[in-house]
Image (cartoon, rainbow, N blue to C red):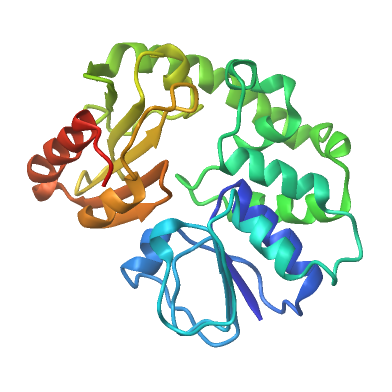
Amino acid sequence: MRIVTRPDFDGVICAVLLYETESITHPVKWVEPADIQKKQTTIKKGDILANLPFDNCCSLWFDHHYTNQTDQPYKGALKIAPSAAGVVFEYYQNKFKHDHDELVHAADKIDSADFSQDEVRHPEKYPYILLSMTITGRENDAPYWDSLVTMLRKSPIEAIMDKPEIKKRCASVIERNEKYKTYLKKYTKVIGQVAVSDFRSFEKAPHGNRFLVYSLFPETVVSVRIFYIDESQEQVVVSVGHSIFNRNCSVNVGKMLSAFEGGGHRAAAACNFHVSKADQYIPKIIDILVENKQN
């Protein structure tokens, strides 16, 4: 069997849990949701899909995204929940030999963005949060993601955070977050109660703590981040998220973006599309968010 999951903290914890409960015979296949939605990766019998859209070729499927619900029969579990790891944990609750409560709690907290202002501004004080920020799907870093799965299966968080490679990556995250704060201040425009950060002028979009925007622009209820997926500038990504501090956005953004070649949660979602559609899609997305009506 093979685990196919997403390269984020929730996907890593899904892999940790599945390694303990299933007979995994192949390395983890790390893919993004769009790879499944657009049939850009091959799913086959024996694959366990976790934290990703459904594919009828898989043998097991676990997910928690609103827009990934399906009428097709499947084995596994779908539940609208804080994390996919929590769904996996509940499904196999009687099969674990080790205590994974702390890991699943961390996955729930991080994937549902249940953060305080201090956790957003100073993630270096919170080991699981800081570790989660070292995981990014923007670059193919599969050996690192694989190593995290192994470490989290075998070692306590204190020992993991003390490893030289982890220390180095965490230091890089802290530095990157400081730079990202500067970019957000310069390239974010507030339209109504919507913070729009347009990074299309960059050959490679800056990235960092995605919750900083809500701390910097507390009057906004939702953020929009726009950037090119790579240097070819042929595909545009629009990432939308409800503020975690000013919770007055009425739009189900996962449902909204399903009409723009994307999807996700009620409060956080993304889409990507050909650059030729940007002038059509982006103003519509922003208008819906400015209007802020329940959909």
Q: Observer-nearest residue: 251 or 47?
A: 251
Q: Is residue 263 left or right of residue 26?
A: left
Regarding residue 135, the answer to whether it shows in the image is no
Q: Position of residue 29 (x, y in %)?
A: 56, 67
Q: To which quarter of the image does residue 11 belong?
A: bottom right
Of residues 181 and 93, the one nearer the viewer is 93
In percent of width and height, residue 82 lies at: 59, 48
Total number of numbered labels? 0
Position of 198 with respect to 78 (left or right) is left
Q: Residue furthest bottom?
A: 45
Write the residue at 68% across / 35% down.
131
Image quadrant where one finds the N terminus: bottom right
Percent x, y of residue 173: 59, 26
Up the image or down, 227 lies above or below 185; here it is below
Residue at point 65% right, 54% down? 12
- Identify the residue at horizontal 65%, vertical 39% (top origin): 109
The percent position of residue 63, horizontal first and vertical second, equals 54, 63
Visible residue check, residue 29: yes
Name above or below for residue 287 compared with residue 135.
above
In the picture, residue 35 is in which quadrant? bottom left
For the point 73% across and 26% down, which residue is it?
126
Left or right: 85 in relation to 244 = right
Residue 240 is left or right of residue 246, and the answer is: left
Is 217 situated above or below 5?
above
Q: Furthest-front residue in view?
A: 294
| Most foreground residue, 255 or 213 | 255
Residue farthest along the right direction in this orientation: 97
